[in-house]
Structures are given as structure tokens and as C-alpha cells.
Amino acid sequence: MNGNARHSQAMHFTARAADKVRNPVLQQALQKAKPLFSGKRAKAMAALPDDGLEFEALREACAGIRDRALNDLDVWLEIFEENARARGAEVLWARDGSEICDLVIDVARRHGVKKVTKSKSMLSEEAQLNDALAAAGIEPVETDLGEYIIQLAGEAPSHIIAPAVHKTLQEVEALFAEKHGRPLEARTSADIPALTREARGVLRQHFLSADMGISGANFLIAETGTAALVTNEGNGRMVTTLPRVHVVITGIEKVVPTLQDFATLMRLLPRSATGQTISNYVSLLTGTRADDESEGPTKTVFILVDNGRADVVGSHYQDILRCIRCGACMNHCPVYFSLGGHAYGWVYPGPMGSVLTPLYTGIENALDLPHASTGCRQCSSVCPVRIPLPELMHGLRQEQQRRGLRPWGERLGLRAWAWVAGRPTLYRALTRIAARYLNWLADGEGRIRIFGFAPGWTTARDLPVVGAGKTFFEQYAASKRD
Amino acid sequence: MRIALYVTCLVDLMRPAVGFAALRLLESTGNDVVVPPAQTCCGQPAWSAGNRPLAETLARKAIAELENYDAVVVPSGSCAEQIRLSYPKLFADDAVWGPRARALATRTQELSEFLAGQGEPLEPPGEFAGSVTYHDSCKGLRGLGIKAQPRALLGRVRGLNLKEMADCEECCGFGGAFAENYADVSARIVDRKCESIAAAGADAVVGGDLGCLLNIEGRLRRRGDETTRVLHFAEVLAGETKP
């Protein structure tokens, strides 16, 4: 079994989705977040011309940069490795999640590490690294505010840039009161700064006492051997500069050729993610502390991870590797905002997750995800690197069909329907019967309230019937006869 | 010009009035309008499910019966998108069907595109005493770029007052098989659409895709909204809006 599939609940999507959609607290949190995400991005994009920029041209450039890196991925990775080593960093390679854990624990043991501070890393979620660290007697502390909240709650991130977006203010208050050992207080949104200060007070002690920091990287810059980190809270700087040891864990697809490329991508990354022209912190981390420097780690380790990515390079799905993890696709997805991220069952939610999860955990282990879409194309219309997400999901649907992975009822139904639709005379006869049947089922107001052929439809809707029991073609033929 | 009206399977079965309204509007442009008699379904449900062989079979059938007209007009952004964007993809590497699919694609238009693209601005025969809000269907909007055309046409209907709703470009949650397979999720999405419609306070919600309209109407009624009309723009333009 694929190692990732062991930790995935993606095969239970339908049941989880039904559960999430009925959770009023979750729905309240999502309803609140939705307009914030899309509104901020829309505003930032509308202001692009003020800076002499144009969205379509920019995203063409960004997609081109990512393609250039992916088309010669091995070459850029070697260049990155050489330049990172030249600046004193160690570069390690991990095939999968368990190798990430082994390498990190090994580095920690070599350097006598007892406590690790972490800034956001989705790769460490792929590896379930926190569990492995704890099992090895090393204390992991998440320092991104959202990550800190869900670590306290014992949950997984539900969004790639806003990990605790599924939590309401009241839930966070209850959690802090319990975990920080203080009485529960009545809170309004005006108290958010106070809650943030509370977390900050706790985290400050950890920053000062940690032996090792673990971060991800938004990009790896090949020409300089640099990890680029795009953050807003400042915890990333603490994690990457205060401890003796800094470990960067990131996917092999994150490499870009040059600093100039990084600058271009930065035009769209913060705007797409949070609607900012630039994030509060942009850190370029290169090598270890030099002899004449007073800050920074004395040991820097890059762990570059495959975990399914290499198989996607050169496949029909390569475009998904352009992803720069801005979250815009999920922020504009009607399905994501009806469910939250946990329903998707693995690390990555929303449209990008519906493509990545089947690819990284096995197509047969995430059959629902490529179908968990209305095909509305809102995701691809906002993607800053022009990933054709609906087409990639459709490619996965085709692959499911080819491999016979769809339920037999669906396959039989489609085949029967297509067989009839290929025979106009039979089709006309059957649709005439269907029109009469629908009309007979409809009540006095022209509505079907329970419909056996499509029970899902009428669980939440009526089926309006207004054809008076006759199809268009039947009525048209009659009008021609008159 | 000889125009083929591609009625679509959903209009044929669920709302024939849309087909007749489209027919009348097309005839009013002074063209020769034909309803090709053997048409059934464009095959989008098969393609959407990922079943390429079935989608190809139905696409070949549609291409053969539609390719001999000067224009093919479809009162649905979704079906028009299937013919215009998906057929050429289906036969991208096919030496025989590829050119035929591409030729048909260039001659196929969604109804509002066709009507708005005529040299003489259309004088819609319909009247509508009241306000309408327009729902942009996803395939028409993001697939074919249809946004201004239906609004321009509706703007010429006497008495009609267009009130935009918030998030008019947001999906209604229909998505074909999605509405059946993920009924709860679909219902949650259409609930947000119903809230936007209610907030706009229009007498009718108007759109260009029957799938979306059935979804929206079905949910509005189930929620207890008995008054907001749900209409295809062809019905409004043609004046076919009697309850």
C-alpha cells in the first residue's frame, strides 16, 4: 500500500462531506471566512494596473517560470544542491514521508535536540512528522498561530494557508482557556488581539528554548541555494534564525531557477493568497551563520522530498506541480466552502487537493475527489500559475473509467443512456413516456417532491415540471402537422 | 443563413417552452431556422463522467447531424461549451473527425451570443413588468465568456429592470451528476445562491442554462419561496413568461 494512503481518509469523502455540511459551527466559521478571502484577492487584483501590472500577462509569466523549472527539474535541483552546499548547508533527499521522519530525527539526535519549533510546513503533514518526533522523545511546537491552535486541539490543518479557518472565535477561546489553564471568558472579535498576545506569550518561551527550527520553503532558488519563506506572523524568522539547527523540508517541485524568477512569482503569490501586495515577511535564507555574523543557525539542513512528485513529472498531470500553494483555488471553490478542508481526508484540500491526493496517495484510494466538483472553473480562473484544475480532475475521472474503478451501477446507467441517445426513434419514444411519467408524478403545483430515479435531487429540492406531459419534439411535430 | 437549433435534451424533456422561445427569437432574425430531427443529447454527461468512448460516439452523431448548417445555436451555455470546446478536444488527434469537430465548433454559438451578435439589434417581442436578477452559469461565463450578451438583450425588454445580485458569477451547485451524487453539498451551495437572490429582491431570477434553473427553482420552492419566478432568458425575450 502507498505510504501516504495509510494516513488518508480520502476514500471516506462522501460520508465525511455529509457530516461536515450538517455541522452548524463549522458552517458558521466557513461562511465568515469566504467573503474575506475572495474579497481581499479581488481587491488586490483590481489594483494591479495601478502598479503597471496585468493579471493575465503576469500569470503567463509565472506559469512559464514554473514550467521551465519542472521541464528540467533534475538539472535545477542539482544546481540548487551545489549552491546550497557551497554556502555550508547540508542537502538530504527523502523518498517519502517515513524517510522525512527518519532524516529529521537523525539530525535532531546528532545535535542533541530536545525541542523543535516549527513554522508552517505542509510537507511535515505529509510525513506526520509531529507524531514521529513525539514518539522519538522530541517535543514539536507549532508556532504559526493557526497551526498552534490546531496542535492544541489535536487536529490537522483544514486549509493550506489558514490552517484553523474551520474554528470559530468561541472554539479558540475555549481551547486556550483549557490548555493555558485559565478561566473561560466572554469574547468578541475585538478580543482577537488579546488571544493572539496570549499565544505569543506562550510561544516566546518556546522560541527561546528550542534547539532546532523546522520550516518549509515557498521556493528554492537554484542560482543561490536559497530557501524563500513568505510569512505574515514573524514566527518564521524566529524558527529559522534563533535555534542552533535549521531544517528546511520542502518538495522537489519548489525549485525555481533564479532570484528574478522568485521576484516575478512574488507579484502574484501574496496577492492571490491574502490580497497583500507583499507579505509582512519575506525571508531569503541562504547557508549557515558565517564567522562574522551574530545570528542564524550554525547548522542548516535541506530535506528535499519526492513523496509522489517524481512520478507526476512528465505525466499528463505535470501542470499541478506548478502550484505555488497560494490557496486561491480553495478560496474560490463552492465545494470547499461548503465542507472545509477536513472532508477531503488527506493533507491538501480543495481543487488542488482533489488533484494531488489521488496522485500522491493512489488514484484508487481517492475515487471521490476528482468528482467532488461542480465543474464551475472558478479555481482555474483565479490560479496564478494557470493550472487547468478542472481538466486535471477530468483526466483523473477518465483514468478511473479506463481502469474500471467506477461503481458498476454508474457505468451501466451511462452505457444504457448513451445507447438510447444514439437511437433517435427509440429516444423520442422513451422521452415521451418519461414526460408523461414526470407529469403524472408532479403535484398540483407542478412539482415532484420525491423522485425515485434521482433520490438525491429531491432530498433538498423539488423538481419543477412544466412541460404539460409532452416533450419539445412531440409538440414541435404536432405544430408542423397543423 | 440556415440555422440549426440544438434544443438540448433537458429543454426537450423538462421545459419545452424554452425551445419554442428560442425558435421564435431565431426566426425573428430573418434566418431560415431548422430543428434537426435526429438530435438527442450532446454527450456531455458521459464526458463529464470521464467516459471518453461514449462521449465520442454521441459527439460523432451530433457532428454528423449539425455540420451542414451555417450556424448552430444552443439555448444552453453548458451544451454549447461541450460542442465548442470539448468536441475538438475529443478528436484532437483524429484525422477525420478532428477537422469536422473544429469546423462545427467555429459555427456553434450559445443563444445570447448569437442574438447579441446580429448586426441589427434584436427587438425582443417580450415585455416584463418587474425586476430580474441574472445568474451567470459557469460553463457559459468561464467557458465561453458570456456575460454582457444576455444583459444587453434583457436591457432591451420593455418594462424590465435588471438588479444585479451579489456573487452572480458564483456556481449554483448543480454540476450535473454532482447534484445527485453529492446532494447535501450541492444543496449547501444552492442555498447561498438562494440567499443572494433573496437579497437582490428581484421578481425573477433569469439564466441561460436549464440545469442551473431547475436547481435554483427546486431549492427556492423547497425553502418556501413561492413567488420568485425562475426563467430562461429566451422565455423573457420572447415574452413567454405566463405562469
Image (cartoon, helix red, strand yellow):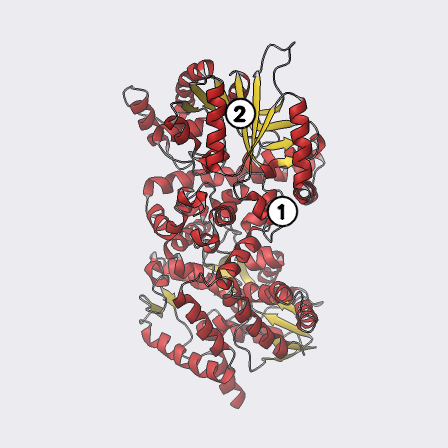
Relative to A122, residue B55 above or below: below
Residue where numbered disc 1 is placed: A386
Viewer can see residue A265? yes
In front of the other: B87 or A26: B87
Chain letter of the residue carrying label 1:
A
Relative to B206, residue A36 above or below: above
User: Does dot 1 land on a helix, a strand or a loop?
Assistant: loop
| Picture residue at 36% right of the left edge, 76% below the top | A439
| Picture residue at 45% right of the left edge, 78% below the top | A471
| Picture residue at 39% right of the left edge, 54% below the top | B187
Relative to B8, residue A169 above or below: above
User: Does dot 2 land on a helix, a strand or a loop?
Assistant: strand
Q: Measured from the top left, where is residue A69 in percent x and y?
A: 67, 40
Both labels 1 and 2 in a single chain: yes
Mark 1 neighbour class, 10 Å CA radius: few under 14, some 14 to 19, many 20 or more = many
Give the residue type at disc 2: Val
In front of the other: A291 or A439: A291
Q: Measured from the top left, where is residue A198 in percent x and y?
A: 39, 19
Q: Measured from the top left, where is residue A54 in percent x and y?
A: 69, 41
Relative to B29, residue A314 above or below: above
Q: Residue furthest left?
A: A183
Which of the two labelled residues, at mark 1 and mark 2, occupies the earlier sequence position?
Answer: 2
- State which mark lies toward you, 1 or 2: 2
In front of the other: A296 or A278: A296
Q: Is residue A250 left or right of residue A54?
A: left
Q: Is residue A82 left or right of residue A422?
A: right
Could you tell me how far apart the alpha carbons at marks 1 and 2 are, in whole angstroms?
31 Å
Mark 2 neighbour class, 10 Å CA radius: few under 14, some 14 to 19, many 20 or more = many
Give the residue type at disc 1: Arg
Residue where numbered disc 2 is placed: A247
Q: Quadrant of residue A299?
A: top right
Chain letter of the residue carrying label 2:
A
